[in-house]
Image (tube, grey):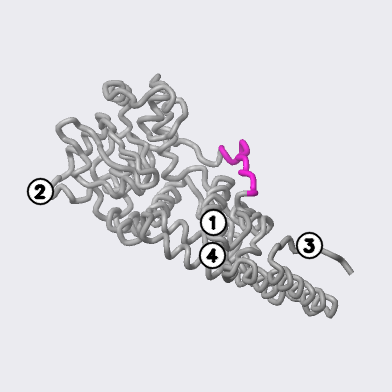
Amino acid sequence: MSQRSTKQTNRKKAQTMADAWEKAAKLASEKRLGEAQARKVIGEIYEAVATERLPLSSTRDFLTRWIEGRKANTSPRTYDAYAQNVRDFLASLGSRADLDVSQVSKSDVAKFRDGVLRRTSPASANKAVKLLRVALGAAHKDGFAQDNPAAKLDTLKRTAADRQKRRAFTHKELRLIIDTASNEWRGIIAFGLYTGQRLGDIARLTWANIDTTRNELRFTTAKTGRNMIIPLAAPLLSYVESLDAGDNPAAPLFPIAAAEVAKSGKAAVLSKQFHALLVSVGLAAEWKSTGTGRNGARTLSPLCFHSLRHTATSLLKNAGVSEIVARDIIGHDSEAVSRNYSHVDEDIKRTSIAKLPDLLAGTPPDANPLSAKRIISP
């Protein structure tokens, strides 16, 4: 027999707790104290002392309610990321998803993270934990859990091999894909090359984003919400001037790509199309998976549309542009930029971009052995 203080000054509450402990002890001795019964006993004690019911919710129910509550407070892109992360975590939990959310452990989160790591990268695994940390933090804040198990995991470090998974294009490779791409894709690639921006942001560009008076690109990034002002490099300006602007400023620069992003809300399909283009010219292999659906690990290619971001950075640095200015133009967040500059002077950016080589020259207007339909919708 063991003795324990209830730490209650109210005799009635102390007796209630003592009776509940005795009940639990009896059930345990009879090997009938399962998790559900234990939670019930704890709930009775909590209600007797706090005069309110103990907040209870299964992980599945709590995260489902939580993600629905995010719709009104986040962008569609962010909401989709949280929703997919929640679905993946619940799948990783299996039957444990129907247990109380307070039962989610550090090992549950680690198992989920390691599953993401096996099929993607340390960066993606860290992002998955970061998103989950917000969700489980809400459970802690709302009184459904004693702590946040996702906050207990350390950030995974990227190895040298991980950092080398993506690389810049060589001039020869650029020439190959530009000469092979459809007219619209050629323009998208040109914007990626001379602005270093993400595929989704480029696909969403309209004529309203082009300042023809100052020859600048002005837009807000979807991922970070950063307002960007990028002077147009001469080769890119020549490309823009060759297009039919029309009378509608809201018209997209790249109608087919814009329609695809508008339909799905993201650029995943466009990424696959660009990969198909790389495959068609021998710069990438067909994607292969070791499993089914999201459980399969996909072989990553060192070249993708994001490689144009690396290429743009390399071109600027090779032209003698400082890292701080290059990062500001591309849109990379940098402690050095924040510490030394409130912004990079516009004239400096213009001078820097003017140093970029013309990699579009010599591309025949119809040098496309592959049809637009095949490249845009492989």
Q: Earlier in the sequence, mark 4 or mark 2?
A: 2
The alpha-carbon separation of the residues under discs 1 and 3 comes to 28 Å
> Which mark sits nearer the N-terminus, 4 or 1?
1
- Residue 293 bears which disc, if any? 4
Query: How far apart in space, not on screen, are marks 2 and 1 (Cα)?
Result: 52 Å
Question: Residue lying farthest left?
Answer: 247
At label 4, counting other C-alpha atoms closer than 10 Å, the crowd grade (few under 14, some 14-19, many 20 or more) is: few
Amino acid on which disc 3 is placed: Ser
What amino acid is labelled 1 in the image? Lys
Q: Is residue 163 left or right of residue 311?
A: right
Secondary structure of the residue carrying numbered label 1: helix
Q: Earlier in the sequence, mark 1 or mark 3?
A: 3
Amino acid type, callout 2: Asp
Mark 3 vs mark 2, CA separation in Å: 80 Å
Q: Nearer the viewer, residue 274 or 139?
A: 139
Q: Which residue lies under the disc numbered 2? A: 247
> Which of labels 4 and 3 is toward the front?
3
- Tell me the CA gap for discs 4 and 2: 44 Å
**Mark 4: amino acid:** Gly
Q: Residues within 10 Å of mark 1 (few under 14, many from 20)?
A: few
Q: Tell me which residue sits at (34%, 59%) in the image.
A: 377
Residue denoted by label 1: 141
Q: Where the C terminus falls, by quadrant? A: bottom left
Residue 35 sits above or below residue 143 on the image:
below
Q: Which mark is residue 5?
A: 3
In front of the other: 335 or 373: 335
Of the two numbered discs 1 and 3 in the rendering, the one whose residue sits closer to the viewer: 3
- Residue at 33% x, 25% y is 344
